Each structure stands twice: as C-alpha cells, then as structure tokens.
Amino acid sequence: MSTVTSSLNKWQKKKLCSLFNHANLSLLFKASVHGYNATTFHQKCNTQGPTVIVAYNRSGYVFGAFTSKSYAQTTQKKAFLFSFNDKEMKEEPLRVVSGNPQFSFTDNGPNFNSLVFHYNNKATVYSNPGTYQFDPQKMHGNDLQMTEREVYRVEDCGGLMVKPWRNVQWNSERRQAVLSYISGWKPSVSSVKQARILLVGPVGAGKSSFFNSINSVFKGYVSMQANTGTAGTSLTTQTTLGFTVYYIKPGSSVSHVPFSLCDTMGLEDGVNTGLDVDDFATILKGHIKDKYQFNPLTPIQPDSPHFNKSPGLKDRIHCVVYVIDISKVKLLSDKTIEKFVAFRKKANQQGIPQLVLLTKVDEACPLVAEDLKNVYQSHYINNMMEEISTQLGVSLSAVVPVKNYYRELEIDPQTDILLLNAVVQMLRAAEGYFDHFYNPEENSVSV
Ligand SMILES: Nc1nc2c(ncn2[C@@H]2O[C@H](COP(=O)(O)OP(=O)(O)O)[C@@H](O)[C@H]2O)c(=O)[nH]1
Ligand SMILES: [Mg+2]
C-alpha cells in the first residue's frame, strides 16, 4: 500500500499545529491521490471527529478551516478559518479568522459561510465572504484555483503529566472547608462589606456562566440567573451591553457572600465595538452604577444618571478578572491582546490586582472532559496557561482554570472545587489591594 504524504512543509506544519497545541495531524484525504470527488471525500472525512481542511493555491497560499466535530455531525461545532503564505513569513505569517461556527454541510462538502473547499468536483474553491468576515485577498490572494487539497484529523492534546503541577484536594471535606473560608472572609477595611470583582473578556468567554456557576455552588443547585449564550444568538441588548453587579446569597443563609461579581459587555477588538478602555477605567474607579447600558460609540458622561460622581472605596473594583476561553488562547488576535494590555495598564495605574480566568477546560482537552481532576496534569492546559501568562504579562500564579456549569442540572464536587479555588484567588488578590492601597488612618485610597 502506498503511503499518502502531506504537502505541508515543516514550517507550515509547525504553524498549523501551533493552533492545536501540537496535536498530531493525521492525513485522511488528499485530492491529488483521491481525486476532486465528493463521494470519496465524504467517505473518508465525514465522521472523523475534529478535522482541518487545507487548500493550496498557485499563488502560494495555504488556507483552510478547522471544525471541532465531525463534518456530518449536526450538533454545534467550533470552527475557524486560517491562512498563511510562505512569502509573508516575516509580516503576518498566520492569520486566523475566528468566530462562531457558521458552518453547513452540503453535498459539495463543508461550507464555512461562505468558503467552500470542495466545490462542483473541481479543483476550485467557492469564496464569497458571508458570516465569516474574511478578506479574500488576505485569505487566498483571490486565487481560487487549487493545486492541492487535504483533510487531516486533529488528534490528541499532548497527554497527561505524571504528576499534577498544582496540588488540589478534590474531596468533599475540602469543598466544605473552602466554602466556609469564603463565607467567613471579610475585607480588612470596615467600610467595605464585599470585594468587588470585575469580569472582562471577549463575548462568549464565559463571564455570565462564571457568575451562574459560582451562584450555583453557593446555592447548592445549578442556577442560570444570568443570560448566557454567544453573540449572534437571541441575546437582548441588556445582556450584551450591560454592566451588572451580581450579589450571591447562599441557599442556607440570609446574608450575601462577601464578594460581588460585575459582569460587563464583551471586550471586542474593533473600532467602536466592545468595552471601551475609558469606560473600563471609569468602572475601576467606581463611577459606573449597576444596570448601566454601554454605548460603544461614546464613553459614559458625568451627567448620566448611571454616573456615580463620588464613589467610595466600596464602589471601586478591587480585583479585575480577565476571562478567556482556554481553547481560544492561541487564536487571540493581536488587536485583542493589545486591548487586554491597554486594560492592564489602566488597572496597574490604579494598583488593582488582576487575574486571568481560563474557562472551558472541559472543551479544550478531552482528558479533562473525561475527568476534571486531570486539569493540572494536562499538557495542553498547562501550555495554554503559560502562553496566556506570557502574552498578557501576568504571573502564572495569577492564571486559574475553571469549568463552568453550562449544561448540567446538578452540581458536582470537582467542578465546585475548581470554581471555589478560583474565588479564593480573587479574594486573596482583593485583600492585596486593601493591604497595599488603602490607608485606614486617612480613610482613603493611596494611588
Ligand atoms: N464547555 C464549556 N462551555 C462553556 C463554559 N462556560 C461557558 N460555556 C459556554 O459558552 C457560552 C458563552 O458563555 P457566556 O457565559 O454567555 O459568555 P459571556 O459572553 O462571556 O458572558 C455559553 O452558552 C456556554 O454554553 C465551560 O466552562 N465549558
Ligand atoms: Mg454574558
């Protein structure tokens, strides 16, 4: 049997693998061997789990698309497009157009609305940017004639380390102990009853789900108080543009837990979209009141009824948490990173401690999906935590992974423990703010 070999050169393979944390790419289909034939294509590729399709054109572009589930599977997939070009190695060696899966599967083959790689049994692609807003020039140089097309199965996440690199006690005693610790925690400043924790991150990162999850841990049952879902679905403006302060009341108690979670609109990277850096700074200082609706075109004005003119220490943000989907760490655009860095600068100026919360660890690594206790043994999770720590310039100790409740009906001790550990880190960070930046004698913040 002849071996079908990949047309990717070493550099191209490395670039591509970096998107999948050095997963193995196993070649399933190659047009020059199997033909530009839809029947063979479907036979070889339809039920292969995560795959990446790669097209090569005469102009030297290598471009394609990833889907997280089998082509033929109708349940929701994650998908993204990518493109690179040998000639541009120095400038923009790899471009990724991320986004919600806008994918349909037709007789022709996978359609990433609208980039169709297998089209009319010919060596051409159909390209007409639709839901995926790609620039055709950058994607394929407007050259739709393919010299080759391949499909690879994306395999594995790097396996497990022998020992976990952070120690977590996964038993129910520990869960109870952490719950009691948090419930009994108090800010060291008497005028503040609750640490105010701000959640910021791209739409769909899991900010609202994180609040729901923490609320569920304290309630003792899964509660979906905050609306969740990704952009493009039936979200109301209130959910996408609002600033909401959430307080949590444990099921067994009359008083609230000693922290509140502030959910904000998404941090998108376009002009006049997403949370503005000035609005962010205004939130940090405590000027923005609960239920404010952001206007991406203009920052909040001091005459707004939602503008608190003289915020106290209790209204300020005591800890900022950047929420990021862990499987998107490699896909963050330069613009998004720049925005995070601008936010970090503002928070640093005000001496506010910051953490990174990496969500969806279950989705990112199958070994963690199988058993959450593998979270600190997964090479993939470890790599992503290190990567984001470098990208955003935060120490690794400030990066915490979680799995949110998002489809479960019952809480589960392991999920709870990881979530509670994240809260402990947030409270410790907030404590640092009170210790370092608050002068009780002057009753003021010294920044
Ligand atoms: N697998 C998985 N999915 C999650 C997790 N957290 C959130 N999600 C999903 O991601 C979607 C977007 O989350 P959401 O909380 O609305 O994001 P937000 O825009 O940051 O508030 C939700 O509909 C959930 O289905 C997680 O930890 N694991
Ligand atoms: Mg939300």
Image (cartoon, rainbow, N blue to C red):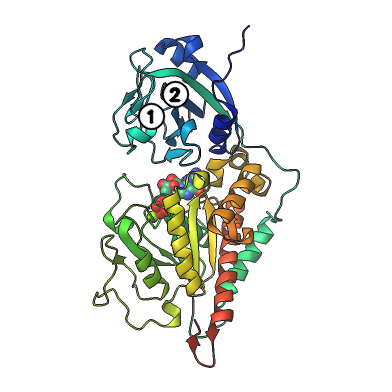
Callouts 2 and 1 close, C-beta under 8 Å? yes
- Which class describes the residues within 10 Å of circle 2: few (<14), some (14-19), or many (20+)? many
Mark yes or no: residue 85 visible.
no
Disc 2 residue type? Answer: Ala
Q: Nearer the viewer, residue 209 or 299?
A: 299
| Residue depicted at 59% across the width and 39% down the height | 21
Check disc 1 and report the residue beneath it.
140
Give the answer, above or below, for where 144 lies relative to 305.
above
Q: Is the residue marked by circle 1 packed among few (<14), some (14-19), or many (20+) residues within 10 Å?
A: many
Residue 218: percent from left, percent from top: 52, 62
Which residue corresponds to mark 2? Answer: 55
Q: Amino acid at mark 1?
A: His
Q: Quadrant of residue 432?
A: bottom right
- Callout 2: SS: strand
Q: Position of residue 270 (x, y in %)?
A: 34, 52
Q: Say which of 315 and 85 sits in front.
A: 85
